[in-house]
């Protein structure tokens, strides 16, 4: 035990030197509060000891890396580095997985976009979505009330031949199933389009190549001439933006069913 | 009695103030505390032996703490700080045990 300053270290006690008073009484006597220098000093030192113990205990509670020795710190640093490497590897793995999943969802998204685009295009054909684009607005003034369903049929025929993509007569969208009829007797001049009675003047909005469509109406023996023979006047305005806003309400077919592709292939 | 009151006062002061241990003291405070504990046990044993001397107690208390801290400091400088502080704690622990055994023999005759 190489520490100096042994406090009150008793030397080897001679056997007969044992004090007569009982040790408890001796302890009690020493513990009695007396204002001696020894008592005060012992009190101060014990206070210092208690203070030190508490401070150290608290310090140990909150001890962080600052208390550690170099070798411990090196070990901890190594551990942290290894752990960091492992986690970085994991991050790479997860990022790869994520990019794969993103690519997968990208192609699914592309398919969904294509399907949506196709649905819109088909909607234009079926007349279920509004159409906008360059085209013409034609007005048919029919003071004599001579223009009938046949003139409209040939008008639509001519427009379609010229590549019109969306047609609206009055406020009725012209689609594949549109029918033009003569109005019932006594209803006056007009034409019934898909059950709606239209009266002159008629406005026809067409989305398509404006030049081609306008020219198609002007060909000799064409729509304009036949209308003039019916003493009706056709005026055409081309525009960069024509809005075909009338919609066609689609009803699900009652009799027709989609045939299997094999069956249609045979019939085509 | 005053010593016990002092111990309590010190503990309470430590709890209430909870001071921050300066960084340069942090490795040495625990060793100094153990050394001071050793001095206190030695003092109690001296009281029971009837040879307690306040001067010896004060000097031994302070020098125990300082020397223990000094040994650890030296060990840190030499690169064997952890081993040396372990050694000091073992030595002080053995002394505390032997002092406690002497006190026990005095008080309980066993």
Image (tube, coloured by chain):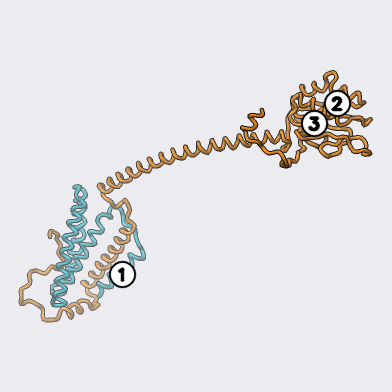
Chain colours: A orange, B cyan
Q: Residue at x 31, y 51 (%)?
A: A66
x, y percent for residue A56:
29, 60
Q: Quadrant of residue A192?
A: top right
> Is there one chain holding both mark 3 and mark 1?
no
Neighbours of disc 1 within 10 Å: few (<14), some (14-19), many (20+): some
What distance separates the C-alpha of mark 3 from that of mark 2? 12 Å
Q: Quadrant of residue B32?
A: bottom left
> Is there one chain holding both mark 2 and mark 1?
no
Residue situated in front as seen by the camera: A89 or B15: A89
> Is there one chain holding both mark 3 and mark 2?
yes
Q: Which residue is mark 1?
A: B9
Tags 3 and 2 touching, CB below 8 Å: no
Please state which of the two labelled residues, at mark 3 or mark 1, is closer to the viewer: 3
Q: Which residue is mark 2?
A: A235
Q: Which residue is mark 3?
A: A205
Q: Seen in the image, is A81 located left or right of residue A115?
A: left
Residue situated in front as seen by the camera: A41 or B93: B93
The quadrant of the picture occupied by the N terminus of chain B is: bottom left
């Amino acid at each position: 035990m190489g520490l100096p300053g042994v406090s009150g270290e008793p030397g080897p006690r001679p056997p007969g030197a044992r004090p007569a008073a009982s040790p408890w009484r001796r302890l009690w006597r020493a513990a009695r509060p007396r204002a001696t220098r020894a008592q005060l000093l012992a009190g101060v030192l014990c206070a210092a000891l208690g203070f030190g113990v508490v401070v150290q205990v608290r310090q140990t509670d909150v001890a962080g890396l600052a208390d550690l020795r170099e070798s411990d710190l090196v070990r901890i640093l190594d551990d942290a580095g290894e752990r960091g490497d492992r986690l970085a590897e994991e991050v790479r793995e997860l990022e790869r997985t994520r990019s794969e999943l993103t690519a997968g969802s990208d192609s699914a998204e592309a398919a969904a976009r294509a399907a949506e685009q196709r649905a819109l295009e088909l909607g234009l054909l079926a007349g279920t979505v509004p159409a906008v684009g360059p085209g013409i607005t034609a007005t048919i003034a029919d003071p004599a009330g001579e223009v009938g369903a046949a003139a409209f049929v040939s008008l639509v025929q001519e427009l379609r031949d010229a590549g019109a993509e969306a047609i609206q007569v009055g406020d009725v969208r012209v689609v594949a199933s549109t029918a033009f009829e003569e109005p019932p007797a006594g209803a006056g001049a007009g034409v019934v389009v898909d059950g709606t009675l239209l009266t002159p003047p008629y406005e026809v909005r067409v989305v398509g190549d404006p030049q081609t469509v306008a020219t198609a109406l002007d060909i000799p023996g064409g729509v304009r001439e036949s209308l003039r023979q019916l003493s009706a006047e056709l005026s055409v305005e081309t525009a960069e933006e024509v809005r075909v806003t009338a919609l066609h309400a689609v009803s699900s077919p009652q009799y027709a069913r989609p045939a299997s592709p094999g069956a249609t292939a045979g019939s085509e | 009695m005053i010593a016990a009151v002092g111990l309590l006062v010190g503990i309470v002061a430590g709890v209430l103030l909870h001071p921050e241990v300066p960084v340069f003291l942090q490795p040495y405070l625990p060793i100094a505390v153990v050394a001071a504990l050793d001095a206190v046990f030695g003092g109690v044993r001296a009281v029971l032996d009837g040879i307690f001397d306040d001067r010896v107690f004060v000097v031994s208390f302070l020098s125990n703490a300082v020397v223990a801290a000094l040994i650890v400091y030296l060990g840190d400088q030499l690169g064997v700080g952890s081993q040396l502080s372990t050694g000091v704690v073992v030595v002080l622990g053995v002394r505390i045990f032997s002092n406690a055994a002497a006190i026990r023999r005095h008080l309980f005759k066993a």
